[in-house]
Image (cartoon, grey):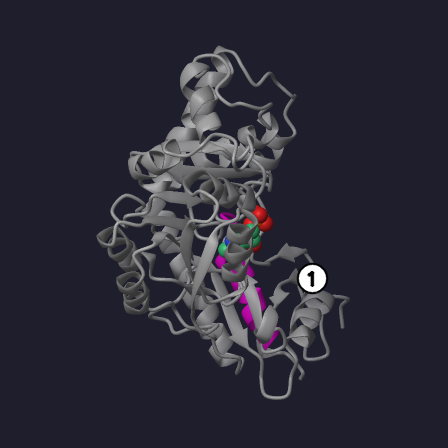
Amino acid sequence: MSRNEGSDGLEKNKKFRMMIPGPVEVHPDVLKAMGSPVEPHYGDAWVEKNRRVLEMLATIFNTTGDVFLMVGSGTCAIDAGFGSCLQSGERILIGNNGFFGDRLVSIAEHNGLDVVQMKGEWGKELDPQAIRDVLKKDSAIKAVAIVHGETSTTVLNPIQEIGPIVREYGALFLVDAVSSLGGVPFDMDNWCIDVCASATQKCLGAPPGLAPVAVNERAWKSIDRKEKGEHGWYADLRVWRQYATEWGDWHPSPITMATNNVNALLVSLTQLMEEGIDVRMERYRSLAMQLREGLRAAGMPPFTTDAKMNPVLTAGVSPQGINSAEIVKYLLDEYAVQISGGLGELKTKIFRIGHMSPIMTKDDIQIVCDALKAFPG
Ligand SMILES: Cc1ncc(COP(=O)(O)O)c(C=O)c1O
């Protein structure tokens, strides 16, 4: 028996595979760009590079609004959206059906907002009509915030249905697309999203460190009525707009830009454009279906239905009496595949497999499927 062959005779592949729900493995050319010489964050060459990145991001958000690239993680962009659009004491409705919904509540509270929650069951989509019911009864709600891809449960919330309802009631719609942008069809303007926050380390296929945020005219109206300085300077979107407009032809951001991260992102976004957004999404969808079939064959069915699946992140349900941590450990120890367990109330019940890396292949998925089928538990 060779070193990589298990007692069941299955060939074990020891190449390390990171299949957690972000960050993701990035393309070697993206890593190479990350290691390119440090360059100035101003001047003609930089302005042009920055412009190309923002233009591609706007295409991926599907917006004619403004896009900024903040240095920070996704939370930084969410914080900027909440703190810029709303005054302390103003009411925000948060549709919360998971760990990152809880996080939105915390971010809102730290910005001094008056939080109302519409709690949904972990593992079930938020109900647009329930959002409508809350908005109908409470005219003090100024904004609604929702996580698109709830990474803790793998549920994809129906923001395309919720957005038009929020607009009907005159509130702002703020969306956390940290784990969906670039991997899931997205239509910011048509879905009536006013501010959308994301991050580079998931479906956008670049290292952690940058947070794209898109802002439309309705959001600017709300931002511009506010006193300056209430929620700090760095996360005030007005500051980012000011530099983009007044210094845009020389030094387009208010801070020292993380130029290496931008170079890496430029490569990953160019690859996405060359592949084609629709082609990339279809590829993810097909990998998700392959994994779902494998989970069923292994007796660990997908946690969500195929009809409502998240195409970049899949959870399997642990067999009766088995803690999902055992499955996570087994894949890492025996196959060098790193996946994640559940979070919160689902901690021991599900395991989560991220397939949001642009370099994920059918072979990677097959290795996981075969390994799960051979799980000795
Ligand atoms: C849906 C969602 N929102 C927010 C975050 C926080 O993002 P970051 O860690 O980039 O600040 C994450 C991170 O996993 C996430 O999955």
Tell me the magenta residue range: 357-372
Residue 326: x percent and y percent?
A: 69, 76
Q: Amino acid at mark 1?
A: Ala
Q: Is residue 24 visible?
A: no
Of 9 and 196, nearer the camera is 196
Name above or below for residue 230 compared with residue 286.
Answer: above
| Element type where label 1 sits in the image | loop
Q: Main secondary structure of the magenta part?
A: helix
User: Is residue 367 rendered magenta in the image?
Assistant: yes
Of 95 and 142, nearer the camera is 142
- Residue at 30% x, 61% y: name it: 135
- Residue at 71% x, 74% y: name it: 6
Name above or below for residue 261 compared with residue 244.
Answer: below
Residue 180: x percent and y percent?
A: 44, 52
Q: Which residue is mark 1?
A: 336
Name above or below for residue 34 compared with residue 319.
Answer: above
